């Protein structure tokens, strides 16, 4: 594990964790398979690249993130600690930019709103919401296999 209290630039996290503490800043982090970047309240992150499945970015405060997220894929996770999860009232939306090279992911609990910029081609179906187990919201990519299993049930 790595703890950041100052500034960390260009870090790659492989099967471990980077904790960005209050007053710390992580810039241009790459999160590989199984890696976690955890931005604690008061910390900040600018730009993240997901480089493998099952990579996780956890933000105690969603507005602590700036820049873009790239490489989002099946099995990746985004934890938003300040967006309360409630089945049926927490919402997710995705709006592609005009060139379809990225867009804005918006997650809201009706009181708090998180807007994150993504690079790549996505649709709203690429994002699923659930509880993070601590009162916040976990955004995940359900993957094509899960979507294919759900399709017949939804069509019925």
Image (cartoon, rainbow, N blue to C red):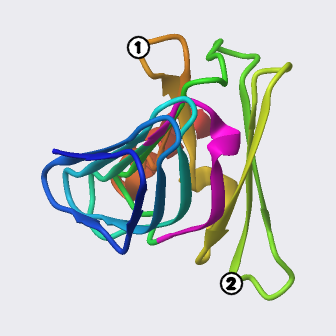
* 41 left or right of 82 in image: left
Instruction: From the top left corner, tell me how far across and down residue 77 is, in percent.
Output: 41, 45
| Residue at image point 76% right, 17% down | 89
The range drawn in magenta is 58-70
Circle 2 sits on which residue?
101
Among all residues in the image, which is located at the extreme bottom? 99
For residue 114, the mark is none
Residues tagged 2 and 1 counted as in contact (Cβ below 8 A):
no
- Mark 1 residue crowding within 10 angstroms, few (<14) / some (14–19) / many (20+): few
Q: Earlier in the sequence, mark 2 or mark 1?
A: 2
Find residue 31 and report its image quarter: bottom left
The verdict on residue 64 being magenta is yes
Instruction: Between residue 118 and residue 42, name the one nearer to us.
Output: 42
Instruction: From the top left corner, tell me how far across and down residue 69 is, in percent.
Output: 55, 65
Instruction: From the top left corner, tell me how far across and down residue 118 is, in percent.
Output: 63, 67
| Residue at image point 16% right, 45% down | 1
Quadrant of image for the C terminus = top right
Mark 2 to mark 1: distance in Å? 33 Å
* 88 left or right of 14 in image: right
Label 2, secondary structure: give it: loop
| Residue at image point 42% right, 37% down | 21
For residue 133, the mark is 1
| Residue at image point 80% right, 25% down | 112
Label 1, secondary structure: give it: loop
Q: Is residue 104 above or below residue 155?
A: below
**Badge count:** 2
Find residue 126 and report its image quarter: bottom right
Secondary structure mostly seen in magenta is strand
Q: Is residue 155 above or below residue 104?
A: above
Instruction: From the top left corner, tell me how far across and down residue 63 is, in percent.
Output: 70, 42
- Mark 2 residue crowding within 10 angstroms, few (<14) / some (14–19) / many (20+): few
């Amino acid at each position: 594990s790595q703890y950041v209290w100052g500034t960390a630039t260009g870090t790659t996290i492989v099967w471990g964790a980077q904790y960005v503490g209050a007053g710390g800043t992580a810039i241009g982090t790459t999160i590989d398979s199984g890696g976690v970047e955890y931005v604690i309240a008061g910390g900040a992150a600018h730009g993240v690249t997901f480089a493998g499945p099952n990579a996780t970015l956890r933000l105690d405060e969603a507005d602590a993130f700036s820049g873009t997220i790239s490489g989002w894929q099946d099995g990746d996770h985004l934890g938003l600690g300040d967006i309360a999860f409630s089945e049926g009232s927490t919402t997710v939306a995705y709006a592609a930019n005009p060139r379809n090279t990225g867009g804005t992911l918006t997650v809201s609990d009706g009181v708090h709103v998180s807007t994150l910029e993504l690079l790549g081609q996505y649709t709203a179906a690429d994002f699923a919401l659930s509880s993070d187990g601590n009162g916040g919201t976990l955004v995940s990519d359900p993957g094509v296999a899960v979507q294919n299993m759900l399709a017949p049930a939804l069509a019925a």
